[in-house]
């Protein structure tokens, strides 16, 4: 077991200016008497230290103990650090909607950004067809192909006694895979061993989501007034690039079904292809971001922990060495492998603070607290993961809490890495297949340890929350196993 390292989200110059504007001008306490009773200035300051995406998020449990469970962090925004919140805002009986934050893609729109429950449910039925058991089996073949390329490249570096910066390689892998699923072609970054310009553009564009998240409406203003600002320019360029690639994908004939084909076919069958362009463009962005920017950081942190603890490598090797890695049912039976992924998702959530919800017009109750209507509710997964009321030794990495030491799970409601209810992640099963396969293949082939002088410091020092977590550099040594 290990105590987690400090989770630092380093500021960007643009974020500093926007953050100052947000705090000074925009985050003035609401006049609502109900909201005023939920936390004064002192608790708002503590909340900013605990949950702000531009500040240091400490693993120190004393911080969580000093912060009230319900804190006013904006004029009409509450941050609630309580295990009951995920189910309260996303569970089957909730009446919450997605918050204004999800208007970022406008005028494009996507499954995970539409705030209309009716539109979401209609679109979700189309997406579900693309993630059936049969479809997943087809996708898994392509994931395996790219995982083989990843292993070949890492083996070459191992033979040359060179470090492997997994913070690059895992992103290259996931972007290639998601390029296949969105546009029926990879970005070629694994083959070229370098960042594709579009991937660089996307990663820079994602940095917009950090500083603008507290004031999402300001982003729409910036799109029209300051398109020359580099952070805005990158976002607009990324959107335009995805639109062009989706246009090309619509005209393309493919031999193997991909996710986009299900979406395109549904529009063709309804005779609404041109009307659905904004949906298709937005969904392309969703596939790329949700499918790569969430899986990659999870793999990075999983291998950080594997390098810290050879014992976990040994246990997983024992589970995978004699099974057919092409058979996902056998991989599903590897309990410690799944536990390692779950613990990584818990302690290093790929979406540390995002997932904003808006309370219903009539208000709602969360535990004994009344939440007024039309209030944005923030339930940061990073903070929920460090609640001692939910997890024994909450700030320690202990995969066994999901297998042989389940008493360490004090309140399972705090764990919802893929969300739940109608807004749960449609790609959850694909993501789990991909992570199980990559970890199993790499552990079966290599021993993993820190490179000389590496201790993970840069991984955390340069870690940023851009809606998804963007980890810093992590150099590891991969040694080919003599026998398996």
Image (tube, rainbow, N blue to C red):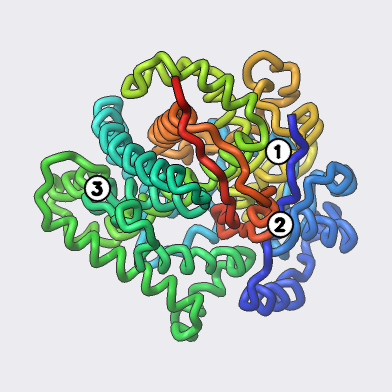
In which quadrant of the rendered image does the C terminus lie?
Answer: top left
* Label of residue 385 in the image: 1
Q: Residues within 10 Å of mark 2 (few under 14, many from 20)?
A: many
In primary-sequence order, the first of circles 2 and 1 is 2
Tell whether label 1 touches label 2 (CB within 8 Å): no
* Rendering quarter of residue 430: top left
Up/down of 407 relative to 106, above or below: above
Name the mark nearer the viewer: 2 or 1. Answer: 2
Q: Is residue 373 left or right of residue 221?
A: right
In primary-sequence order, the first of circles 3 and 2 is 2
Up/down of 45 relative to 440, above or below: below
* Rendering quarter of residue 61: top right
Q: Which residue is mark 2?
A: 8
- Cα distance, mark 3 to mark 2? 36 Å
Q: Is residue 180 left or right of residue 109?
A: left
Question: Which residue sits at x=46%, y=43%?
Answer: 158
Q: Is residue 332 left or right of residue 405?
A: left
Up/down of 81 relative to 286, above or below: above
* Label of residue 260 in the image: 3
Residue 471: percent from the left, percent from the top? 59, 54
Residue 183: percent from the left, percent from the top? 24, 53
In which quadrant of the rendered image does the N terminus lie?
Answer: top right
Question: Which residue sits at x=37%, y=57%?
Answer: 193
| Visible residue check, residue 428 | no
Q: Is residue 156 left or right of residue 83?
A: left
Q: Secondary structure at mark 1?
A: loop
- Residue 293 vs residue 417, the one in the foreground: 293
């Amino acid at each position: 077991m290990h105590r987690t390292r400090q989770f630092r989200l380093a500021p960007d110059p643009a974020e500093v200016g926007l953050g100052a504007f947000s705090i000074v001008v925009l985050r003035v306490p609401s006049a609502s008497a109900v909201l005023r009773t939920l936390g004064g200035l002192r608790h708002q300051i503590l909340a900013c230290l605990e949950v702000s995406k531009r500040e240091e998020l400490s693993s120190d449990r004393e911080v969580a103990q000093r912060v009230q469970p319900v804190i006013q962090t904006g004029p009409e925004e509450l941050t609630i650090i309580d295990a009951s919140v995920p189910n309260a805002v996303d569970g089957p009986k909730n009446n919450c909607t997605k918050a204004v934050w999800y208007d970022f893609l406008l005028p494009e729109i996507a499954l995970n950004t539409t705030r209309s429950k009716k539109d979401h449910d209609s679109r979700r039925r189309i997406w579900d067809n693309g993630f059936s058991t049969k479809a997943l089996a087809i996708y898994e073949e392509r994931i395996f192909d790219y995982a083989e390329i990843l292993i070949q490249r890492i083996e070459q570096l191992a033979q040359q006694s060179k470090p492997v910066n997994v913070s690059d390689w895992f992103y290259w892998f996931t972007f290639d895979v998601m390029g296949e699923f969105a546009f029926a072609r990879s970005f070629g970054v694994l083959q070229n061993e370098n960042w594709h310009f579009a991937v660089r553009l996307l990663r820079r564009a994602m940095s917009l989501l950090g500083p603008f998240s507290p004031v999402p409406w300001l982003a729409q203003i910036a799109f029209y007034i300051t398109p020359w600002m580099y952070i805005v320019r990158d976002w607009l360029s990324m959107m335009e690039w995805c639109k062009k690639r989706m246009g090309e994908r619509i005209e393309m004939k493919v031999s193997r079904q991909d996710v986009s084909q299900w979406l395109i076919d549904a529009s063709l069958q309804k005779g609404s292809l041109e009307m659905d362009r904004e949906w298709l463009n937005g969904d392309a962005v969703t596939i790329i971001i949700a499918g790569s920017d969430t899986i990659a950081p999870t793999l990075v942190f999983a291998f950080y922990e594997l390098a810290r603890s050879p014992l976990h490598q040994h246990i997983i090797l024992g589970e995978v060495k004699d099974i057919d890695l092409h058979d996902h049912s056998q991989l599903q039976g590897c309990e410690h492998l799944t536990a390692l992924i779950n613990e990584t998702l818990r302690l290093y959530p790929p979406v540390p603070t995002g997932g904003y919800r808006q309370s219903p017009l009539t208000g709602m109750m969360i535990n004994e607290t009344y939440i007024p209507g039309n209030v944005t509710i923030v339930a940061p997964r990073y903070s929920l993961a460090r609640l001692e009321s939910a997890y024994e030794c909450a700030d320690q990495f202990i995969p066994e809490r999901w297998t042989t030491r389940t008493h360490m799970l004090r309140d399972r409601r705090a764990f919802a890495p893929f969300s739940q209810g109608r807004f749960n992640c449609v790609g959850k099963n694909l993501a789990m297949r991909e992570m199980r396969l990559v970890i199993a293949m790499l552990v079966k082939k290599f021993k993993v340890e820190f490179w000389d002088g590496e201790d993970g410091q840069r991984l955390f020092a340069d870690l940023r929350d851009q809606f998804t977590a963007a980890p810093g550099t992590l150099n590891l040594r991969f040694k080919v196993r003599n026998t398996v």
